[in-house]
Image: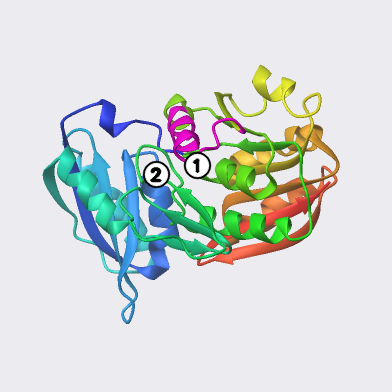
Amino acid sequence: MNTHKNPFAQSKHYWKVTFNILADAVSTTENSFDNFALAVSGFETDEANGIWTFELLFGEMPDMEDIKRRLLVLSSVHNVPLPEATVEKLEQQDWLAQVARSFPPLSIGRFYVHGSHVEETPPAGSISIQVDAGAAFGSGEHGTTRCCMEAMDWLARSRNFRTILDMGCGSGVLAIAAAKLWRTDVLAVDIDPVAVSVTQKNARDNREHVRVTAAVSDGYSGDVVKRGGSNGKYDLIIANILARPLIKFAPDLYFHLQPGGTAVLSGLLTSQETMVMAAHRMQGFDLTRRFVHQDWCTLVIKK
């Protein structure tokens, strides 16, 4: 899952739209605006009343009527009050400072994910990963990324992988996590060149640029995927994308996974789990374990 445009490369100015919505509609809200805004962030601001605040980032003045229509659909589908959206023009530097303040370090299993602004020493025995929230999806705070890291931490306690593919790498946080866990080479690919560039930077910042190779690929069709691993086969494939691409790629996943290999599938809602798993069972996969965070689900499957 990625943000397909780079806000930092487009304008000195940008616009932030803010609204509150009830927790029942959180997962659908993220999907509704994921490909509409440059960046989407949501965080719980009133736990007692189940209220979340969402912020949408735009490189130009957004169409507020379109935003209102999308919110109206969310309100109707989830039977929640219609959110009232406000918009403000911001300076880029102010936004970056705000992101730093709103991105506290996260402990996920053995992982300690933090931005460059965090000065505290990582907990003893933790695996430190530095990722700044920015132009590509995946800084650890989203349920899909969190569940993937929990699944990887669990796998690493009993399994050793040598050939790893991160399909749809986003910020590269999962590829970096895999390189640190298994101390092996990881191929990270994404259809978005911005995501590939961000992954390369993050790999350098985490001193994993030797192990992590990032490249552009449209799914499994890229030559880099076909040449990587062991003759194009991998014993672990991580795919944190969306339900429909996961279903579409199920045959490719089976083809590129070593016999007995493992895949971590994420980016799907719990309501989409049945259809995603059905598509993979048809290819010859079995479910090993599932991880759930709020409405998001991660599946660990085996060939």
**Dot 1: element:** loop
Looking at marks 1 and 2 on the same chain, the residue that comes earlier in the sequence is marked by 1
Q: Mark 2 highlights which residue?
A: 34
**Residue at left 67%, top 43%?**
183
Please say whether residue 82 is visible from this viewpoint. yes
Q: What stretch is highlighted in magenta?
A: 197-211
User: Is 27 included in the stretch rendered in magenta?
Assistant: no
**Residue at left 65%, top 44%?**
238
Q: Mark 2 Cα within 10 Å, few/some/many (few <14, many 20+)? A: some
> Which amino acid lies under the numbered mark 2 shown in the image of this protein?
Asp
Please state if 83 lies on the left or on the right of 114 as rendered.
Answer: left
**Residue nearest the observer in this picture, 151 or 105:** 105
Residue 134 vs 268, above or below: the answer is above
Say which mark, if any, is on residue 1: 1
**Dot 2: element:** loop
Q: From the top left corner, tell me how far across and down residue 41 is, in percent.
A: 33, 53
**Residue at left 56%, top 24%?**
215
What distance separates the C-alpha of mark 1 from that of mark 2? 9 Å
The answer to the question of whether label 1 and label 2 lie on touching residues, with beta carbons closer than 8 A, is: yes
Q: From the top left corner, tell me how far across and down residue 167 is, in percent.
A: 61, 36
Say which mark, if any, is on residue 13: none
Please state if 97 lies on the left or on the right of 300 as rendered.
Answer: left
Please say whether residue 242 is visible from this viewpoint. no
**Residue at left 51%, top 39%?**
172
Residue 27 appears in which quarter of the rendering? bottom left
Residue 156 vs 175, above or below: the answer is below
